[in-house]
Image: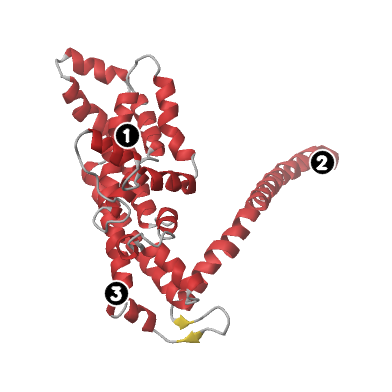
Amino acid sequence: MAQADAPAHLANRARTAQPKRRLTARRRESLWFYLIISPWLVGLLLLLAGPMVYSIYLSFTDWNLFNAPEWIGLDNYVRLFTRDRNFGMALGNTFYYTLLYVPLNIVLSLGVAYLLNKRLPGMRFFRTVIYLPYVVPVVATTMVFRWVFAPTNGQLNSFLALLGITGPAWLLDPLWVKPALVLMSLWGMGSSVVFLLAGMQGIPSEMYEAASIDGASERQRFFNITLPMLSPVIFFNMIMSIISSLQTFTQVYILNADPNTPNNAINMIIPYLFDNAFRFNKMGYASAIAWVLFIIIFVFTLVVIRSSSMWVFYESEMKK
C-alpha cells in the first residue's frame, strides 16, 4: 500500500515544485531587466535627478563656484522679479520670439508637408532637401545667416532691392533682430515637416475617396479630414516647439558675440542664465533663473495639454 501511494506522493511534490520554478524564472527575468537598464538609471540619478534636486537648494544660496554656498533664502527670486531689469528684458524677448516662432512653425510646416504629400515626380528629392537644414549644425546655420542678413551685401536685402524694397539692417536694428532670428529658426523646420508628412500618409485613403464621392472639395477634405486626423501630430509639434523656443541658446549666443548686435533686443533666458552661471560666477542666481524657466515651460505645456481635449482628435475615439 505504501508503494502504491509513493507515485501519487511524488506527483504532488512535482506539482508543488513547478510554481516555484516559474517564480524563480520571473525573478530572474526581473533581475535581468533591472541589470540592463541600470546604466540608464544610474545616469538618471547622478546626471539629471541629482543635479536638479541640488539646484533647488542652490537657488536659495549665494554661490560663486569657489566658496561654500551661503544660504540667503528667497533673495535670488526677489531680485529676479523686482530689481533685475535685464531678466525682464530677456523674459520679454523670449516670449516675443516664442509667440512668433511657434504659430509660424506649425502653419508653414503643415503647408510644406501638404505640398510634399502630393504624388508628383521628384517628391522624394524635395522631401530630402526640406529635411537637410535640420541636420546641419546650428552654429554653421547661424554663421551663414549672418551673411544672408548683412545690411549692405546680404543676399536677402539684395533680393529685396530687385523688388524695389529697401531692406532693414536685420541684425543691427532692435526692431528687426528678433524677426530675423525667427526666420533663421524656421529654416530648420524639417523635423516638424517629417512628422506631419508621416501623419498625412497614415490617413486612410478610403476617407478621401468617400468624401470625394459625396462631392467634398479639396478645401473641405483638408479641413474636415486632414486637419482632424493630424491634430495629435500638431499637438506634439506644438509642445516641442514651445519647449525648444523657450530654451533658445546657440543662435543668440553666436549673434551676441558681434559687438554691433543689440544685446538687449535679442538676449533671452537661457543665454542670460549661461552668463550669470559661467561668466559672472553667480551659480545660485543662475539656478533661480533655471527654476523660473522650468515653471514657465511647465505652465505653457500644461495649458496646451489641458486645451487639447477641445481640438485634438484621436482615431480611437471614433471606434468607441
- Residue found 42% across the figure and 63% down from its top: 271
Q: Which mark is nearer the camera, 2 or 1?
A: 1
Label 2 crowd bin: few (<14), some (14–19), many (20+), radius 10 Å: few
Mark 1 secondary-structure assignment: helix
Residue matched to label 2: 6
What mark, if any, has residue 316 been given in the picture? 1
Q: Nearer the viewer, residue 25 or 9?
A: 25
Q: Nearer the viewer, residue 215 or 257?
A: 257
Q: Earlier in the sequence, mark 2 or mark 3?
A: 2
Relative height, residue 139 to residue 199 (above, below): below
What mark, if any, has residue 85 been given in the picture? 3
Q: Earlier in the sequence, mark 2 or mark 1?
A: 2
On the image, the x and y values in percent for residue 312 come to 26, 41
- Under mark 2, the amino acid is Ala
Mark 2 secondary-structure assignment: helix
Q: Is residue 50 left or right of residue 247?
A: right
Mark 2 to mark 3 CA distance (whole Å) = 90 Å
- Under mark 3, the amino acid is Arg
What mark, if any, has residue 72 been given in the picture? none
Q: Quadrant of residue 186?
A: top left
Q: Which mark is nearer the camera, 2 or 3?
A: 3
